[in-house]
Image (cartoon, rainbow, N blue to C red):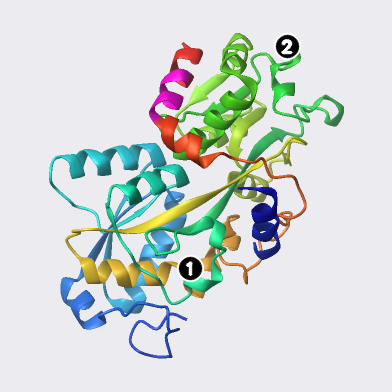
Amino acid sequence: MDTLSRRTFLAGTALALAGGGVRPSFAQAVDMAAAKKEGKVVWYCSVPVATAQKIGNLFQAKTGINVELFRSGGSNILRRFQQEAASGKVFVDVLTHSDPAAANALTKKGMFVPFKATDFDKVPVEVKDAQGMHVAQRLNVMAIYVRDDMLAEADRPKTWTDLLNPKYKGKIVMPDPNFSSLLVVIAGTLGKVHGWQYFEKLRANDIMVVQSNQQVSDMVKRGERPIAMAADAAYVGPSRKQGLKVSILYPSDGAFVIASPSSVIKGSPNPNAAKAFADFMLSRDVQELFPSEYLYSARTDIGGPPGFPSLTSFKIHPVDYDYVEAESARIRRRFSEAMQ
């Protein structure tokens, strides 16, 4: 994203299911009678599990259509989807993950159905496909967070390279890009900017790599590691609610703001229910849920989580998504090699 686009993004950053209301001219029709006849939608997603279940329950309560949920890390659900597609079988209707580069690659392969939801225009152009092949469901802020009672303010890292300081040896935990697609973007970008020796130095600093952001959060909660690196800031909210003193650090060289693209799958078993669910995903019912779950809505007309900074208040690290798309497999491999 260039400087002008990023500035536009920062400046920018009622479902008509049963015909109740006028759909904008760009929005595509949803055949609700057919969707209800199908009776279910299969959703593969990397949304935090409690939030995903709330979304599914809301949709079922509104439409009577059941949501069959498979929730895992973004890299894991992408791997499962692509393996199924390669075997000629499509089991999923809607795919939501956190790898914009993968969304672009799968769009080029013709894996998605173009669909523009009722509120498609409320999402910034930088985080959606112009034809509706994918659109951000939410925005993820990835930064550093620390235990206040275990790390004095004067001792906290200010940049990504600060984490290489020997004083942080044995204190850092991070998620694995082989499980979390968010980390593919971050690992690829930091590897490109600082060289892969950056991760080799982190390994020498006794960094711990676990599968998911949930596991990172659990490690910090238990005090086993006081520093979470390249971690989802959304997990800080529940920790604070439980009384834990945790601070989010936004590195001066840029925190990462990464979209979670959502797509309707071509050849899916429940195509009408898939469109109904995709339409619902951008509705106020869902998008206003995200801030209450410490997540950022994809819509420009909905504010961020209470007590969390706006996206304009900290530097955002630039990402070369063309590079991440082209090097995705290599990024995962190089990271694993660096951490061995």
Q: Dot 1: within a 10 Å radius of its alpha carbon, few (fewer than 14), some, or many (20 or more) residues?
A: many
Mark 2 highlights which residue?
166
Q: Residue reaching furthest right?
A: 154
Q: Is residue 332 located in the magenta-colored stretch of the structure?
A: yes
Q: Dot 2: within a 10 Å radius of its alpha carbon, few (fewer than 14), some, or many (20 or more) residues?
A: some
The circle drawn on residue 275 is none
Q: Position of residue 151 (x, y in %)?
A: 77, 27
Which type of secondary structure does the marked residue at label 2 adopt?
A: helix
Query: Along the line of sight, which residue is nearer the eye, 57 or 277?
Result: 277
Query: Along the line of sight, which residue is nearer the eye, 112 or 182?
Result: 112
Identified at 47% across, 71% down, the residue is 120
Identified at 35% across, 75% down, the residue is 61
Query: Which range of residues does the magenta coloring cover?
Result: 329-334
Q: Is residue 273 located in the magenta-colored stretch of the structure?
A: no
Magenta portion: prevailing SS class:
helix
Q: Quadrant of residue 230?
A: top right
Numbered label tally: 2
Q: Position of residue 103 (x, y in %)?
A: 40, 48
Q: Quadrant of residue 9?
A: bottom right
Q: Is residue 255 left or right of residue 267?
A: right
Q: Amino acid at mark 1?
A: Val
Mark 1 highlights which residue?
286
Identified at 35% across, 89% down, the residue is 19
Q: Is residue 266 left or right of residue 303?
A: left
Vertical relation: 256 (above or below) 326: below
Vertical relation: 26 (above or below) 290: below
Mark positioned earlier in the residue sequence (2 or 1): 2
Q: Amino acid at mark 2?
A: Pro
